[in-house]
């Protein structure tokens, strides 16, 4: 606990972010609800002047006990990670999680009226056989299911991932009536498709095969206080020492980090990928 930001420090950083023009905050992890009082943090951030949206990404294992409180707080969206519908695979991926808990959370979130999305990472020869079953949840619950390409962050090997070009080919083979959906689904880079008459959409986040860096406007704050301009690099600025300084100094350091955001990630760039590649796991940097 001594190595991570307090809630008061997180709120102060979010307040500085709002003063710089950032209006949307996403609470991620690891798993955010592992930390006691997470809903109180969300409530405080929601109350910051200039913050228009607060969303949360969760594995859904404990979401049931927070869903009513999140609805009352006015959370703007819930993203639930789900990479398999097979109980044994689920336990292998999560280490200790139970599939039925996450599926129940998806159902509750969909019924709550809160904008709900499922995030799925497909891997060759592991869960690619489940693509249609997972995608069907979009039509069953009227929510968005998003397939995210594997990014080579930390120990992850992008070569084991399935490209969204292949994912779309498979989906179109199953549902030839899928059509591009130009409506706004959120603040991210996903490209969406929809079946006529369906309330749910299928999104593709193609970080590798559909590079969208020129449109990326995201900054990532780790639990230990590093402000990261890009997932691909280990660069950033440590905000912890600046929390001892004035609000003006904190805000100016954040402004500098924002304006030094890299032009593009270095995934797959053999010339630059090793120099400042991010070696920490996604769960350690808010993924």
Image: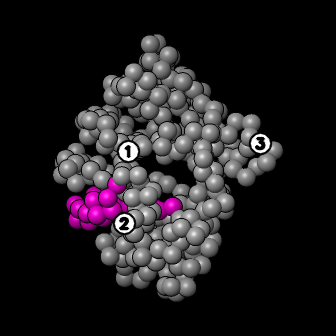
Outermost residue, top direction? 245
Q: Is residue 111 left or right of residue 54?
A: left
Q: Residues within 10 Å of mark 3 (few under 14, many from 20)?
A: few
Mark yes or no: residue 113 visible: no
- Taking the magenta stretch, the answer to whether it contains residue 118 is yes
Question: What residue sits right under mark 3 in the picture?
Answer: 272
Up-down: is 9 above or below 33?
above
For marks 3 and 1 on the same chain, the one whose residue lies earlier in the sequence: 1
Outermost residue, right direction? 271
Q: Residue at x 38, y 29 (%)?
A: 10
Question: What residue sits right under mark 1 in the picture?
Answer: 31
Q: Residues within 10 Å of mark 1 (few under 14, many from 20)?
A: some
Helix, strand or loop at mark 1: loop
Magenta residues span 97-121
Question: What residue sits right under mark 2 in the picture?
Answer: 87
Q: Residues within 10 Å of mark 2 (few under 14, many from 20)?
A: few
């Amino acid at each position: 606990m001594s190595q991570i930001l307090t809630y008061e420090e997180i709120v102060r950083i979010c307040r500085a972010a709002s003063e710089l023009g950032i209006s949307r905050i996403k609470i991620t992890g690891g798993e955010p609800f592992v930390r006691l009082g997470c809903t109180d943090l969300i409530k405080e951030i929601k109350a910051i002047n200039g913050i228009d949206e607060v969303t949360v990404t969760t594995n859904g294992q404990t979401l049931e006990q927070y869903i009513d409180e999140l609805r009352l707080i006015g959370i703007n969206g819930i993203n639930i990670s789900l990479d398999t519908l097979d109980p044994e695979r689920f336990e292998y991926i999560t280490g200790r999680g139970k599939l039925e808990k996450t599926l129940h959370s998806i159902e509750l979130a969909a019924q709550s009226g809160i904008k709900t999305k499922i995030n799925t990472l497909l891997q060759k020869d592991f869960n690619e056989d489940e693509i249609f079953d997972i995608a069907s949840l979009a039509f069953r619950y009227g929510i968005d299911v998003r397939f995210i390409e594997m990014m080579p962050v930390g120990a992850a090997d992008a070569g084991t991932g399935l490209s969204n070009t292949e994912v779309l080919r498979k989906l179109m083979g199953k549902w030839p009536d899928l059509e591009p959906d130009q409506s706004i689904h959120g603040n991210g880079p996903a490209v969406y498709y929809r079946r006529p008459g369906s309330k749910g959409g299928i999104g593709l986040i193609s970080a590798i095969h559909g590079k969208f860096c020129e449109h990326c406007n995201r900054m990532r704050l780790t639990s230990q206080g590093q402000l990261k301009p890009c997932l691909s690099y280990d660069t950033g600025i440590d905000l912890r020492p600046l929390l001892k300084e004035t609000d003006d100094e904190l805000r100016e350091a954040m402004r500098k980090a924002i304006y030094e955001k890299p032009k593009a990630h270095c995934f797959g760039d053999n010339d630059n990928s090793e120099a400042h590649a991010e070696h920490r796991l996604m769960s350690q940097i808010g993924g």
